[in-house]
Image (tube, grey):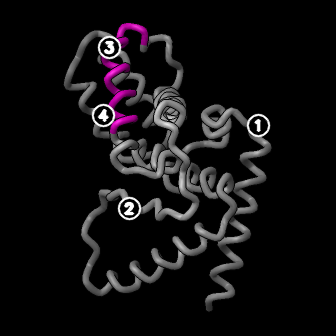
Amino acid sequence: MNLVALDHINKEIVHRIALGDQKAFEGLYHLYYKRLCQFAFLTLRSKELSEEAVSDVFFNVWMKREQLTLVRNIRSYLYTAVRHQAIDYLRAKNIVPQNEVNVYELELESPEPLPDDMMEREQFSVMLQQAFDELPERCRMIARMYFNDQLQYKEIAEILDISRKTVEAQIAIATRKVKEFFEKER
């Protein structure tokens, strides 16, 4: 689905939620929940805390649904809210995030691969994880937001409160380092 179509769908969903449509809210929840949990996990390093933070954000969205019509981009709004919630959790619970944690501990929904492709996909996935693990933490977070969550540079910049140029530079670094990793592994 292209971004223009997704934006249109999101605007329609937001409008319906603002009017109290619970089914639309459930649709938004199912559309973003897992990705937002993975995003929160980058900060919290705990599956349970990540799920709790995302659930809190969705609870607040529902409670303040009438104000959603003021939101220009629901995707950016949700990621920003989750980022702030995760930071609040770190502060409130005096959590010190660990450096070496596999961010793929959270389950991804994907169609079942064909048996012939499973080994190849698994090897590629392991290598990609290794390549991402070698990136500096900030670069890794930005790269995951761009490649995994398919956020635009502008959205990432807004969510992380950094410049678009910084995002562009970090994506370029990540791309170069991942490419170098795969060339080295051949």
Q: Earlier in the sequence, mark 1 or mark 2?
A: 2
Single out the mark in the foreground, 3 or 2: 2
User: Badge 3 is on which residue?
Assistant: 63
Instruction: Give residue 49's position: percent from left, percent from top.
Output: 38, 42
In contact (CB < 8 Å): disc 4 and disc 1: no
Closer-to-camera residue (85/143): 85
Q: Which residues are magenta?
A: 52-67
Decide if residue 9 is on the left or right side of residue 158: left
Say above or below: 64 vs 145.
above
Cα gap from disc 3 to disc 1, whole angstroms: 31 Å
Single out the mark in the foreground, 4 or 3: 3
User: Badge 1 is on which residue?
Assistant: 163
Closer-to-camera residue (78/24): 78
Q: Earlier in the sequence, mark 4 or mark 1?
A: 4
Decide if residue 84 is on the left or right side of residue 173: left
Residue 1 on the magenta span: no
Say above or below: 174 vs 146.
below
Amino acid carrying label 3: it is: Met
User: Badge 2 is on which residue?
Assistant: 105
Decide if residue 84 is on the left or right side of residue 46: right
Asked if residue 184 can be seen in this view, the reply is: yes
Cα gap from disc 1 to disc 2, whole angstroms: 30 Å
Q: Main secondary structure of the magenta part?
A: helix
Please give the name of the residue rendered at 60% of the width and 42% of the height, measured from the top-left corner.
Answer: 152
User: Badge 4 is on which residue?
Assistant: 29
Q: Residues within 10 Å of mark 3 (few under 14, many from 20)?
A: few
Q: Residues within 10 Å of mark 2 (few under 14, many from 20)?
A: few
